[in-house]
Image (cartoon, rainbow, N blue to C red):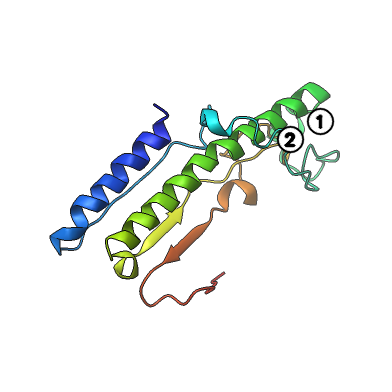
Amino acid sequence: DFYTDVLSRQATDFVSRAAPEDQPFFAYVAPTAPHAPATPAPRHKGTFAGEKAPRTPSFSEEDVSDKPSWLRDHTAQFDDEEISEIDNRYRQRLESMLAVDEMVASLVEELEATGELENTYIFFTSDNGYLLGEHRAKDQKDRPYEESAHVPLYVRGPGIAPGTQVD
């Protein structure tokens, strides 16, 4: 079985058993997707076949003269093969996240079916950002750049108005 799907079944089963107890419950669900090797579920393979990693201004930077010596002296611009690898990694990450999307939807549906959705806080976040070609980094998450440090945090639940945004 595909790991994210197994985790999804376990999490929704937990909610279906915990909700009728009329006691608060806590679930921490941490799928490995999109971490390497970012294997997509078989049903999602090829869904993003034409996608390429974003080509931001920092992608395979031409001029790194303003960067630290460890980057300036030890990295080169990417060749076509390296760019193809980055794009492939990006597609795999996108495709692997589709099962996570389905898992979240399944959990929300189960919370709604048990009458607990309106009493439940859901936090959705990540452990780190990830570089896919920015600042000449092929696949790192440990660089001192915004793309590595910036992670999303979404929260929904009682008392939180839809569309609320805090920077």
- Is residue 148 shown above or below 164? above
Q: Position of residue 109 (x, y in %)?
A: 38, 56
Determine whether, in the image, residue 2 is placed left or right of residue 130.
left
* Quadrant occupied by the N terminus: top left
Residue toward you, 95 or 59: 95
Name the secondary structure under disc 2: loop
Examine the rendered structure and indicate whether residue 89 appears above or below residue 18: above
Residue 145 shows up from this direction = no
**Mark positioned earlier in the residue sequence (1 or 2):** 1
Cβ atoms at labels 1 and 2 below 8 Å apart: yes
159 left or right of 94 in image: left
Q: Which residue is mark 1?
A: 77
Which residue is located at x 37 percent, y 52 percent?
A: 107
Image quarter where the C terminus lies is bottom right
The type of residue carrying mark 1 is Gln
- Mark 2 lies on residue: 136
Of residue 46 and residue 129, the one placed in the foreground of this image is 46
Mark 2, residues whose alpha carbon is within 10 Å: few (<14), some, or many (≥20)?
many
Between 33 and 65, the residue placed more toward the observer is 33
Q: Nearer the viewer, residue 6 or 58?
A: 6
Residue 100 position within the rendered picture, expressed as x and y whole percent measured from the top left: 47, 43
10 Å crowding of disc 1: few (<14), some (14-19), many (20+): some
Q: Position of residue 45 (x, y in %)?
A: 60, 30
Give the label on residue 5, or none: none
Q: Amino acid at mark 2?
A: Arg
Image coords of residue 77 (percent x, y): 81, 30
Q: Is residue 114 visible?
A: yes
Whole-Å distance between the Cαs marked 1 and 2? 6 Å
